[in-house]
Image (tube, rainbow, N blue to C red):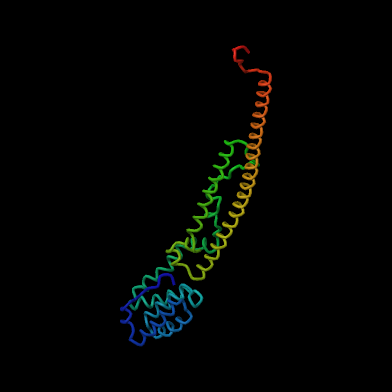
Amino acid sequence: MKTRQLLGLGFVLFCGAAVADELADADRFVAAKEYARALPIYAKLAASGNAVAQFHLGELYWYGEGTPADTAKADELFRKAADAGVADARQALQLTPQRAANQAKIDYYVKQYDGADVRLNKFNCVKPAIPVLSTTAEDIKKVTAGIDGWQHCYKGFVSNLTTLLPVGKAIPADLQNVMTDEEITAAVALLDKAYASAAGDAKVEADAMLAAQDAWRERTNSHVVSANAKTASDLALMRAQDEKVRAINRDKGVGFTSPGGAR
C-alpha cells in the first residue's frame, strides 16, 4: 500500500472496542505486508457495514494487495466509506481519475522503459584515440589527457546509475501512488533489466578502453626506456670517442704548451 492512511482515534466513531481490536489486528497484518491475512478481517467488518473496514478493504482491492487488483470494486467500497463520513475515502476516490490521467506514464515504466536515459552514450564521453605507442612527450601528454577525460566521464555515468538505486527509485512517488503492486513489481523488473544492460554494455566499453590503455602504456614505456638507454649509450660512446681523441692529441702534443711557451 503506497500511502497507508492513519485514521487515528476517529475510527472509534465507527466501531466499538471489539471491532477496533479486529481492525488493529488487520492493520498490523498490512504493516507486515501480510495482506492475505488482513483481507478477510476487513471483508468481514466491511460486510457488516463498518466504514473504516470498507475504506481499508478498498485500498487492498485498488492496489491489488492480497487479491487481484479491482479498481471498480475498490471505488465502490471507497464510495460507501465516504458516504459514511470517512474523509480519507473521499480522497481515495480521486485515485482512479488520477490513474487515468497518468496511464501513459504508468505504461512507460511498466512496458516501455529501455534505459536510454542512463546509458553511457547519454553522457557523450569522448573516446580518445589511443595509438599503438607514443614517441614524443607531447603525444604522451595528449593521449593521457584524453584517457583521463574519458575516465572522468565514465565515473559520472557510474555515479548517476548508483543514485538510481534501489531499483524503482526513479519512478516518481506520486506516480507510484496510483500504480498497483503488480505494476510496480513489473516496472522494477523492467528498470532492473535496463540498468543491468546499460551497466553491462558500459563495462564492455570500459574493459576495451582499459586494455587499449594498458597496451599503449606498456609499449610507450618500453619505447621510452629503450630510447633513454640508447641515448645513454650514445652519450657514453660519444664520451669514449672524445676521450680517445683527447688521448691521441695528448700523445702528439696537440693542445699542450711546452714550458718555454713554444708548441
What residue is at 36 percent from the left and 86 percent from the top?
Answer: 19
Give the left or right position of residue 192, taking residue 5 as reference. right
Q: In the image shown, does 57 or 124 lie closer to the viewer?
A: 124
What residue is at 38 percent from the left and 82 percent from the top?
Answer: 24
Give the left or right position of residue 29, taking residue 84 as reference. right
Q: Where is residue 154 in the image (x, y as percent from the top left)?
A: 54, 51
Q: Position of residue 118 (x, y in %)?
A: 53, 55
Assign the N terminus to one quadrant of the image.
bottom left
Q: In the image shown, does 238 or 110 lie closer to the viewer?
A: 238
Q: Position of residue 170 (x, y in %)?
A: 47, 60
Q: In the image shown, does 19 or 146 lie closer to the viewer?
A: 146
Assign the C terminus to one quadrant of the image.
top right
Q: Which residue lies furthest to the front in this view?
A: 259
Asked which quadrant contains residue 126, the reply is top right
What residue is at 40 percent from the left and 68 percent from the top?
Answer: 94
Q: Relative to 4, say whether 42 is above or below.
A: below
Asked which quadrant contains residue 229, the reply is top right
Give the left or right position of residue 16, taking residue 152 as reference. left
Give the number of marks: 0
Q: Relative to 52, say whether 124 is above or below.
A: above
Q: Residue furthest bottom?
A: 18
Q: Relative to 131, say whether 116 is above or below.
A: below
Q: Where is residue 18 in the image (x, y as percent from the top left)?
A: 35, 88
Q: Relative to 190, say whether 30 is above or below.
A: below
